[in-house]
Amino acid sequence: MNSTRKKNLERALGSSVDYILSRQHADGSWIDWELPPGQSSTWTTAYVGGKLTSLESPYRDRASSATAIASQWLTGRMFPDCGWGYNEQVDSDADSTALAILFLASEGRTVADSSYSCLERFQCEDGGFATFRGRPDLGTWAISHPDVTPSALLALKTKYAATTQAINLGLQFVLNQRTSAGIWKSFWWTTFLYSTERSLSLFEAVRLELDLQVTRKTLLHTRPQNPFESALLLSSLLWLPDIAKDQDVWPLVDRLVADQALDGSWSSPPMLRVTRRDCREPWKPGDPDPLFRDQNRLFTTATVMNAFSNLHKLA
């Protein structure tokens, strides 16, 4: 990394942190999205807070007061079943619960055993985790999802050893979901890069060594369409061994730095899919499901911030 690129990276990273901190509400929450159930508070706070606590110093130190307040707020918003959901008007789901556990654990807060038990109830017989469980009308919202399972397993790993049955079964599901192109499809997101990045981070966390040459080839031929995809691609590449940073990584960084808005955020296209409950493979062409964007740009900006921090740690 030459000195100019390093300074550009650090300046963009600092600006993204400042943007996210500026959008925190006085009670400690972050709010984004506008889906049919309304805006998201708990899910967004768990996601954004977790990205902030993953930063290295001095960026994490800059955000420490904000994450402390956010973790306190999120702890107080735990549902009666000891899980968390998209917002306080809907049921608990596996993704929100997993992200909440990951954030709270990274903040050093004690996570109740009952919250882990709540998360484990979303695990299906095939080892994967469904986003929702417990109602007959949920349809495919209650089957295992490749973009939710890695986060659930990472959350369980904050309490259990990687050799426990639940994690072993989940890992086998994730491995079985890898396509012939070496990537993972996403049920809720328009890009396969979300579930692929989550899966690769899971393998790193459990120290599972795989032959990722096909994955590498596919990723290197992927052309991201927006900052969210660029950030996920960047993070995915950084999980691979012996990646050529000058050739494969820095062009993504240069583009993201150039596309950053003056307020420190990145633009956000529609990228979250509300999949029909009768649809098992929403990634196939022609799917009419409605798409949504994070209008406050918090998910996108936090994702880019996280990717930049991951690269800076390796520099």
Image: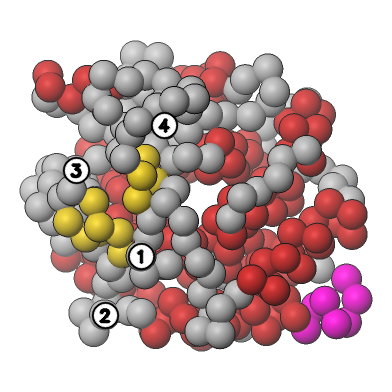
First-in-chain label (4 vs 3):
3
Q: Nearer the viewer, mark 2 or mark 1?
A: 1
Relative to residue 44, is residue 36 drawn left or right? left
State the extent of the magenta-drawn residues as a range: 1-7
Would you say the residues marked 4 and 2 are in contact, meaning their CB atoms lie under 8 Å apart? no
Identify the residue under disc 2: 25
Which disc number belongs to residue 69? none
Q: Disc 4 residue type?
A: Phe
Identify which residue is drawn at 70% across, 80% down.
10
Distance, label 3 to label 1, CA atoms, is 23 Å
Q: Nearer the viewer, residue 82 or 290?
A: 290
Badge 2: few (under 14), some or many (20 or more) residues near its Cα, within 10 Å?
Answer: few
Displayed quadrant of residue 39:
bottom left
Identify the residue under disc 3: 92
Can residue 225 be seen? yes
Q: Disc 2 residue type?
A: His
**Is 257 one of the magenta-colored residues?**
no
Q: Disc 1 residue type?
A: Gln
Q: Nearer the viewer, residue 313 or 278?
A: 278
Would you say the residues marked 2 and 1 are in contact, meaning their CB atoms lie under 8 Å apart? no
State how the image is colored.
Answer: secondary structure
Identify which residue is drawn at 84% across, 51% down.
248
Badge 3: few (under 14), some or many (20 or more) residues near its Cα, within 10 Å?
Answer: many
Q: Secondary structure at mark 1?
A: loop
Q: Nearer the viewer, mark 2 or mark 3?
A: 2
Q: Nearer the viewer, mark 1 or mark 4?
A: 1
Residue 169 x %, y %: 46, 20
Identify the residue under disc 1: 295
Position of residue 17 relative to residue 171, above or below, is below
Q: Disc 3 residue type?
A: Ser
